[in-house]
Amino acid sequence: MTVKVIVKEDYQEMSCAAAHVVEKKITENPQAVLGLATGSTPLATYKEMVKGYKEGEFSYRNIQTLNLDEYVGLDKKHPQSYHRFMCEHLFDHIDIDLDNTHIPRGDAPDIEQECQRYEGLIDQIGPPDLQILGIGRNGHIGFNEPGTPFDSTTHVVTLTESTRKANARFFSSLEAVPTHSITMGICSILKSKQILLLASGEEKAPAIDRLLNGEVEEDFPASALKNHPDVTLIVDEKAYQKA
Ligand code: GLP
């Protein structure tokens, strides 16, 4: 399958285009299931979605959401939890019913059981009609690090040093970054009907180049997206350069 590529001038343009895709989806289907991601990349997309909501143009009342991942050991209220992230950047500013938002529980007493529960939830209320995805510099999607089997479902991962370092900017120190996370697996992500991959900035250029021009291999998790029939990459010019 080929990944559809849309190149935008900069981060803001990329984000407006992504928000537009989301808004089109929920206009077509006000009960759509959205797959959501964290990280810096989707921040301005969420901001645009909030803007569209405040301008009275869109409602999220009957939308369901499924997030990709969460750090193990952080409870919902922890400032760096992805729960908090989603509330601060999106859920608190739109008319979504919080009962319809789903994120793995990083503080579940039995993490393995939580993985099974979450995968069941994806099948029960999902799969997402539209999944928003970012990409790590090493090609990780969700928290699926290089080497993750393409048939993986929701599971616990040990974060690589490079991912912990990349995410340390959100924490007080590298030591404060959790060592494990729960993530939808690659198979879980590919269940989505449509995938919107976002990438911005020159540090993502090598990963985007490898995605578009490299092999499909487990050593590069994002390459699994080439096995999906409906993936659109919205990328800014800095991330769309030959590495
Ligand atoms: C984290 C998240 C991913 C995200 C990636 C890239 O590891 N678990 O879902 O895509 O980082 O993050 P950023 O968008 O901040 O570059």
Image: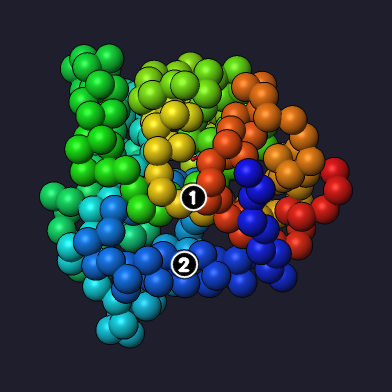
How many numbered marks appear?
Answer: 2
Residue 121, how many percent across, how many down? 22, 35
The circle drawn on residue 21 is 2
Residue lying at 35% horizontally and 53% vertically, measured from the top left = 129
Residue lying at 38% horizontally and 24% vertically, measured from the top left = 153
Determine crowd level at label 2: few under 14, some 14-19, many 20+ residues with C-alpha closer than 10 A: some
Residue 135, how many percent across, how many down? 59, 42
Q: Amino acid at mark 1?
A: Ile
For the N terminus, the image quarter is top right
The coloring applied to the image is rainbow
| Side of 207 relative to 185 (left or right) | right
| Side of 136 relative to 193 (left or right) | right
Question: Which residue is more in the foreground, 85 or 194?
Answer: 194
Q: Which badge, 2 or 1, comes first in the chain's sequence?
A: 2
Residue lying at 49% horizontally and 42% vertically, measured from the top left = 170
Q: Is residue 222 visible?
A: no
Residue 149, how many percent across, how many down? 53, 18
Query: Residue beneath label 1, please?
Result: 195
